[in-house]
Image (tube, rainbow, N blue to C red):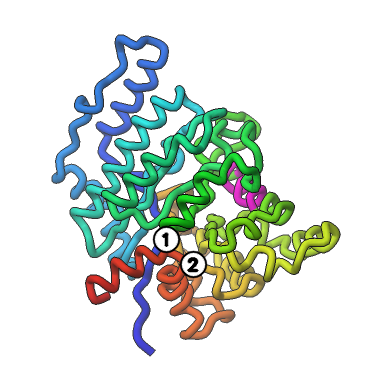
Amino acid sequence: MKKPMIIDIHGHYTTAPKALENWRNQQIAGIKDPALMPKVADLKISDDELRESIETNQLKLMKERGSDLTIFSPRASFMAHHIGDFNVSSTWAAICNELCYRVSQLFPEHFVPAAMLPQSPGVDPRTCIPELEKCVKQYGNVGINLNPDPSGGHWTSPPLTDKQWYPIYEKMVEYDIPAMIHVSTSCNACFHTTGAHYLNADTTAVMQLIQGDLFKDFPTLKFIIPHGGGAAPYHWGRFRGLAQEMKKPLLSEHLLKNIYFDTCVYHQPGIDLLTKVIPVDNILFASEMIGAVRGIDPETGAYYDDTKRYVQATPNLNDEQRYKVYEGNARRVFSRLDAQLKAKGR
C-alpha cells in the first residue's frame, strides 16, 4: 500500500507577524475613537516576514513530525466576532484571509487556505457570503470556519439547525466545501476559551444537529466537529440514547453521513477512544499545532499536539484505515482540495 500523504485539516495562523496584532489593537481602539481607526493600507507585512513566521514555526514542526500539507485558516481566537460591528468584522476577516492566502502562495506544496467569515452578533449570516465567495473563487479556499456563537460565550444566536444559517449552507453546498464548527475567544468569565468554550461548542453543535433535521434539507452538507468532537465520542451512548428518545434515526444515518471529527485530542487514550467509538470514515487527521496546547507532555517527552504519534500508535487502526484518516477522508470531505492536488499530480 502506498505511503499516505499526511493532511492536517486543522491549522491556524497563530504565528502571524506582530504587525497584525498591532493593527488589530488599533482597530479595536478605533471603535471607541474613530480618529484612531487604522486604514487597511496601514498594515504592511512583507513576504519575507511571512516566510520567516512559517519556516521557523509550522513548517519546521510539520517536517519534524512528518506532516505534508495543512489546511490553514486565520487564528481562531483572533476572530473575536463579538468585537465591534459587521464592518469591523468584515475588514478584519478580509485581512486575515488574505494573509492565509499569501502563505499558501509562498508555500503551495504545504499550505491550502480555509476562510474565517465576517460574522457579527445579531447580523444576518447572509452578509458573510461576499467574503466566502471571494475566498473560494479568488483564493482557492477549500473550506470555511463557522462560528455558532459570534457573541463569544453568551450563545445569543439560534441553533445551527435554524433557517437563519441556511444562506451559508446553500453556498457550502453550491461550492461543495465543508465548514469546521469553530468558536472564537470567550468573553464570558465562566468559560475558559480553549479549555471550556471550544469543547462546549463542539459538544453543543453535535447535540443541536441531533435535535434537528438539518440534513434532510441539505443532504450533502458537511461539518467538521473539531477537537475530537468535544464530549461527543466519550458520551456517544448518551447521544444515541437521547436521539432514540427523540424518535430520531440511528446516528449512523442521522449524523454520520454529514459530520466528521478531527484528531485534535492530546493524549493516547483519547485517540484510542475516538478511533474505537467513531467509524474510521468519519475521522480526519488534524493537530491544530502551535495552538491551544503547546507544551511537552512530561509523561511521554513529546509535544501534546503531536497527534500523528497517537494515530500511529493506536491499536484500533490498520494501515488501510490509517490511510483514510491521514489522506483519504480529507480528500473526500474537502473535494476542492482533492481537485487541486490531482491538478498537481499528487
Instruction: Tell me which residue sits at (50%, 46%) in the image.
Output: 168
Instruction: Tell me which residue sits at (31%, 58%) in the image.
Output: 112
Closer to the camera, 115 or 111? 115
76 vs 242, left or right, is: left
Residue 277 image position (x, y, % from top left): 66, 71
Where is residue 61, by image quadrant? Answer: bottom left
The disc labelled 1 sits on which kind of residue?
Ile
Closer to the camera, 259 or 228? 259
Residue 306 image position (x, y, % from top left): 43, 63
Q: CA distance from mark 1 to mark 2?
A: 7 Å
Where is residue 106, by image quadrant? Answer: bottom left
N-term-proximal mark, 1 vs 2 = 1
Quarter the C terminus occupies = bottom left
In the depicted structure, whether residue 190 falls above or below residue 112: above
Where disc 2 sits, the SS reads strand
Where disc 1 sits, the SS reads strand
The disc labelled 2 sits on which kind of residue?
Leu
Q: Which mark is residue 150?
A: none
Instruction: Tell me which residue sits at (40%, 66%) in the image.
Output: 335
The residue sitting at the bottom extreme is 1
Callout 1–callout 2 Cβ contact below 8 Å: yes
Q: Within 10 Å of the Cα at label 1, are there few (<14), some (14-19), or many (20+) other Cα atoms?
A: many
Residue corresponding to mark 2: 284
In this orientation, does residue 105 appear?
Answer: yes
In the depicted structure, whether residue 4 falls above or below residue 147: below
Asked if residue 7 is among those painted magenta in the image, a careful observer would answer no
Q: Within 10 Å of the Cα at label 2, are there few (<14), some (14-19), or many (20+) other Cα atoms?
A: many
Instruction: Tell me which residue sits at (41%, 73%) in the image.
Output: 327
Tell me the magenta residue range. 196-205
- How many discs mark residues in the rendered view? 2
Where is residue 65, by image quadrant? Answer: bottom left
Residue corresponding to mark 1: 9
